[in-house]
Image (cartoon, grey):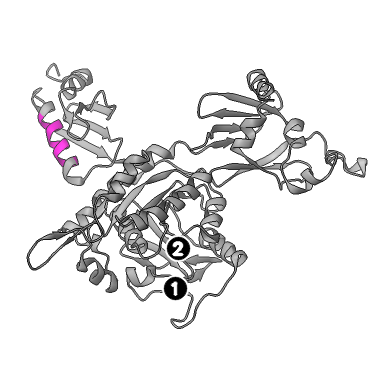
Amino acid sequence: MSSRISPQQVLEALKGVEDAAQQKDIVSLGYVKDIEVTSDRTVIVIEMKTAAPPKANSQLAATIRKAVESLGVQKVEVEIATPSASPPKTQSNLIPNVKNTIAVASGKGGVGKSTVAANLAVALNRQGAKVGLMDTDVYGPSVPALMGGKQEPHVVEGKLEPPVEWGIKIISMGYFLPEDEAVIWRGPMLHKTMQQFLGDVNWGELDYLVMDLPPGTGDIQLSLSQTIPLTGAVIVSTPQDLALDVAWKAIAMFKKLNIPILGIVENMSYYVCPHCGVREDIFGHGGAKAAADRLAMPFLGEIPLDPKIRVQSDAGRPIALDLNSPLAEAYQSVARALAEQVTRVGQEIPQIMTE
Amino acid sequence: MALAPRTIRLHGEGNDLVIEWADGHHSSYSYQYLRDRCPCATCLDSEPAPSWESGPLPMFGSGPLKPEKAELVGRYALQIYWSDGHSSGIYTFDYLRDLCPCADCESARENVQ
């Protein structure tokens, strides 16, 4: 029994372990949640403050194991909990079990909003989170095609059961319309639709509900922003000035409604010629990053212009699913930055207490 | 981002609605004070504000005024459901902060005027 070490000794050893991303030791970062020493094993529970790629987590676990084993302990188990799977909770009666709602918006159309939204949903899901994808563009719904599949929503016990594609629950006006018909509605109908997409769909428990918004600053954006306390908005823009100028308008709207901007994504950032490998900045490059810096807003990352994204999107299989592709990694990196921002703003939602 | 509440306590100890703001400031509003300043169109258009507490038929008075519940409107406002059945007022956070009845805010307002 005398050979058993104390949790205090383990903690001392952990002070020598550094989180590579933060460049600080994991004890002072507050990552160490629990240390349990029993006669046959030592369990260390780590709770990360921000989401990290799985590879970084397993590296950290190995370093911790090595540090503790150097104390002469035989069986060391390390459990790492990442926040992407359990972000802070928002408050809405319509969707009580949805923790975070993220609006993907843009000023102009055609910047790839829906493609970014679909791939972000997949990337967040790949990081272990439960994700829903709500296509709020009732005029031009494109999410069903992007996510593929032939399922349709059906009613179960008074609630709409959303199709699940690639692990993501999806709702879209596209499921309810014959292909050659259009939605020709005014504002009040749109408002009602948004409320039903939220309240009448069986979303169940979700970590993130990603919402693909139509372009601009109209009825749907307003309805959503007033119906639920959105966690925040992601602005998608191409790098050229023309698109960025209009993106300001979307940002201004969210600011007016007190909705945090989670960050800007630069889509169609650059093009690498598949024949000669030369990189071409078709719409210019870095415009969104410069703009984000100027406004002191988080820059979430850049997604290149690549025909593979278009081919995969048309085939209903988002590129973020292809784990070995650098394009999927680009989306993963944006999703990680996004999860980090959600953790940052999540706590700022006012809590109403009745007692 | 405009200033937002951190917590909103509907039934404070002094029969008041208490807001703790993100900057640490505390505001405590008596129910009647808030109800009198309801920003909805009906209340704004009637001078003086209609007496909801008793209504035109006083025997149907619903007891002392208090908020039954409140909901966030998006991330910028609070909708209060009063015990007299009125609920159409949407109090934006900016408006609530401007209404703060504490001595500091009161004198700040006077200085502006």
The crowding category of the residue bearing disc 1, from other C-alpha atoms within 10 Å (few below 14, some 14 to 19, many at least 20), is many
Q: Residue at x 43, y 40 (%)?
A: A346
Quadrant showing the N terminus of chain A:
top left
Q: Which segment is the magenta one?
A: A57-66
Q: Position of residue A264 (x, y in %)?
A: 34, 49
Look at the magenta stretch and give its main secondary structure. Answer: helix
Q: CA distance from mark 2 to mark 1?
A: 14 Å
Residue type for callout 1:
Gly
Q: Is residue A155 left or right of residue A12?
A: right
Name the residue carrying label 2: A214
Q: Residue at x 24, y 60 (%)?
A: A320
The crowding category of the residue bearing disc 2, from other C-alpha atoms within 10 Å (few below 14, some 14 to 19, many at least 20), is many
Name the residue carrying label 1: A174
Q: Is residue A32 above or below residue A258?
A: above
Q: Is residue B59 above or below residue A68?
A: below
- Viewer-proximal residue among B59 and A341: A341
